[in-house]
């Protein structure tokens, strides 16, 4: 049985979200518009201690369809 540390999983998702934004050449302000997420919310989740929300994960998956959902969530794929 594999034990998944939720805090590590959240940190890793956050790292991948930041990686996606860099890859796309988006700062938080521009990304908030592209993803239709309030700028303050996105900034808190990406640059501060906020957790990555499922709304943000879904927005990334729906907007950047070339990004593998499996990779975004687990790092695989």
Image: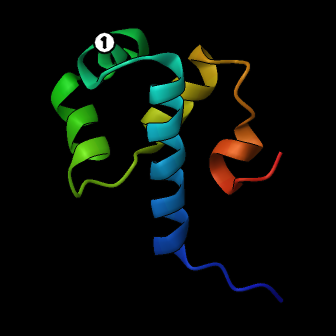
Viewer-closest of 61 and 31: 31
Residue that appears at 71% across and 37% down: 69
Count all numbered tags in the image, as a single digit: 1
The N terminus sits in image quarter? bottom right
Residue that appears at 69% across and 86% down: 3
Please name the residue that numbered disc 1 is placed on.
30
Q: Is residue 61 left or right of residue 20?
A: right
Q: Is residue 48 left or right of residue 12?
A: left
Rendering coords of residue 62 (x, y %): 61, 19
Q: Residues within 10 Å of mark 1 (few under 14, many from 20)?
A: few
- Helix, strand or loop at label 1? It is helix
Extreme bottom residue here? 1
Residue that appears at 46% across and 73% down: 7
Q: Is residue 66 above or below residue 34?
A: below
Extreme left residue here? 40
Rendering coords of residue 14 (x, y %): 45, 50
Rendering coords of residue 57 (x, y %): 52, 37
Q: Quadrant of residue 45?
A: top left
Residue that appears at 51% across and 72% down: 8
Q: Is residue 13 above or below residue 25?
A: below
Rendering coords of residue 56 (x, y %): 44, 34
The C terminus sits in image quarter? top right
Q: Is residue 36 left or right of residue 77?
A: left
């Amino acid at each position: 049985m594999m034990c998944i540390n939720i805090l590590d999983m959240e940190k890793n998702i956050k790292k991948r979200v930041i990686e996606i934004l860099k890859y796309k050449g988006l700062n938080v302000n521009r990304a908030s518009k592209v993803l239709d997420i309030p700028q303050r919310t996105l900034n808190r989740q990406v640059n501060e201690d906020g957790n990555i929300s499922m709304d943000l994960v879904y927005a990334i998956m729906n907007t950047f369809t070339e990004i593998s959902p499996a990779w975004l969530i687990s790092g695989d794929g």
